[in-house]
Each structure stands twice: as C-alpha cells, then as structure tokens.
Image (cartoon, rainbow, N blue to C red):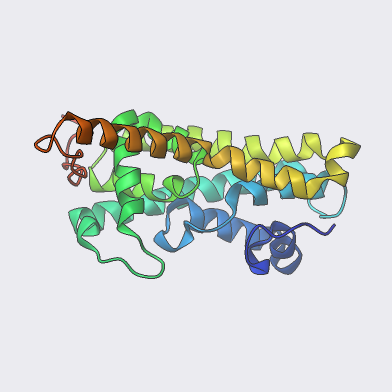
Amino acid sequence: MNTLALGPSWLDPDYLLNQFGIYGLLLIVFAESGLLIGFFLPGDSLLFTTGLLITTSQLKFPLWLAIVLICVAAIVGDQAGYLFGKKVGPALFKRPDSRLFKQENVTKASEFFEKHGPKSLVLARFVPIVRTFTPIIAGVSSMRYRSFITFNIIGGILWGAGVTLLGSWLGRIEFVRENIEAMLILIVLVSVVPIIIEFVKARGESRRAAAAGPGAGPTPPPAPPQRGRHAKR
C-alpha cells in the first residue's frame, strides 16, 4: 500500500512500517509517549495504519499481540517521561529553545496538566505533542505515583488499543482502503483540533485583556508546576 506522506517521507507511516516493522513501531510509540525527542513522531496515523495493514494481511502479525505490545510500549514510555520529569524538575522550564526543543511545548503541556489534573494523562494521549510532554510535567509536579500509574494505564490502553482497532475496523471497508491517504489526513486534522481550540481561546483572552486597558495586559505564562500539588499528603 502506498500512502501520501504527511511530511518528510521518513515520517510516512507506511514507510516506517515497511522499513522497521512492528518492533520499530513499538520504539516509536515508546519515544512519542515520554521522550522529549519523540514529540514530532506520527503516533496516531501510525497506529491506525498498523491496524489497517494487519487486517488487510499486508503486515503479517497477530492483531491482538500488536495491541498488547503497543499498549505496553505506550505505558512504559509515559513511565520514562514521569521519571525524567521527577529527576529534571523545574530546570526543564529554564531549558533554552533548540531545533528539537521548544519551550512553548512545555508551557502548553503544563497548562493542559494544570487544567485537567490527573485525567490529563488520558486526554493528552489523543493530542499530538501534548501527549509527549504531559507525563514529564506530571513528574515535575511530583504527582502521586498511584494516581499517575492508574491514569497512565487507562490512557495507554484507550489510545493504543482504540486507534489500532479503529484502523483494523475501518480497514475492512473498501472505501477506506481505496482512500487511505484521505483517512490519514483526516486523523491528523482531528487530532490537532484540541490544539486549535486552545489557540483560539488564548487569542481571544489576549484580545479581551488588551481591550480592557493598558494595565490589564495578556495573562503571563504559567509558572513551573509546584512539586507536591498532586502529591500524596
């Protein structure tokens, strides 16, 4: 199956699966779930394509085993992100921008975590970029480990199994198989809707603050999460 790459050819899900197989997929899921360098990887479209290719027998691997391994990789990836956040702490908010690291990504994840609390670990699974940084922010804030591991497992299963099974189910439909490029683009667009909504809301708040007067000004960026806020007391 040939798909339309949504960016560089080496980020095309079909190319990645053909080159690295299921074990390359697991490494990508792990990296995107909690390593700073993994935020740009195509997690959603990759899982969807995996389910579709297995259903159409283009990828020779048991679907149930692929789902189990994907869920484990996602959960372990978040675990690595949490431990990294606990070790690095607030220093993460002082790290300078680089080609692969943008401070704004940390800020977005911090705002997301502060707004939704522990359940953000589930919600963030379905938001590109945010899903990479949220477990790290949970570690920075010293979120209670029992809560973290509970929501981590729930989110990892819902995302890993859900998106893969969606690809498997839709892969049985001829229209989907014949229009896989459009389906992948649709998945990417749907996954970035939450980011667009938050951006529009932030722009609206800035405009209202500016209209209120020169003294109001835009809301300052959030401070690093305080350790212990979500910790056990």
Quarter in which the N terminus is drawn: bottom right
- The picture places residue 88, in percent across and down from the top left corner, at 24, 58
Quarter in which the C terminus is drawn: top left
Taking the view exactly as shown, the residue that stands out farthest to the right is 174
Q: Is residue 13 above or below residue 127?
A: below
How many tags in the picture?
A: 0
- The picture places residue 223, in percent across and down from the top left corner, at 17, 45
- The picture places residue 17, in percent across and down from the top left corner, at 72, 61
Residue 31 in sight: yes
- Please indicate whether residue 121 sits to the left or right of residue 206 in the image: right
Residue name at image x 19 percent, y 53 percent: 90
Q: Hey, which quadrant is residue 59 in on the image?
A: bottom right
Residue 136 or 206: which is nearer the viewer?
A: 206
Q: Hey, which quadrant is residue 36 in on the image?
A: bottom left
- Please indicate whether residue 153 sits to the left or right of residue 88 in the image: right
Residue 231 or 99: which is nearer the viewer?
A: 99
- Please indicate whether residue 38 sits to the left or right of residue 118 in the image: right
Residue 62 in sight: no
Q: Is residue 230 above or below residue 178?
A: above
Taking the view exactly as shown, the residue that stands out farthest to the left is 215
Q: Is residue 99 above or below residue 119?
A: below
Residue name at image x 32 percent, y 56 percent: 84
- The picture places residue 5, in percent across and down from the top left corner, at 70, 60
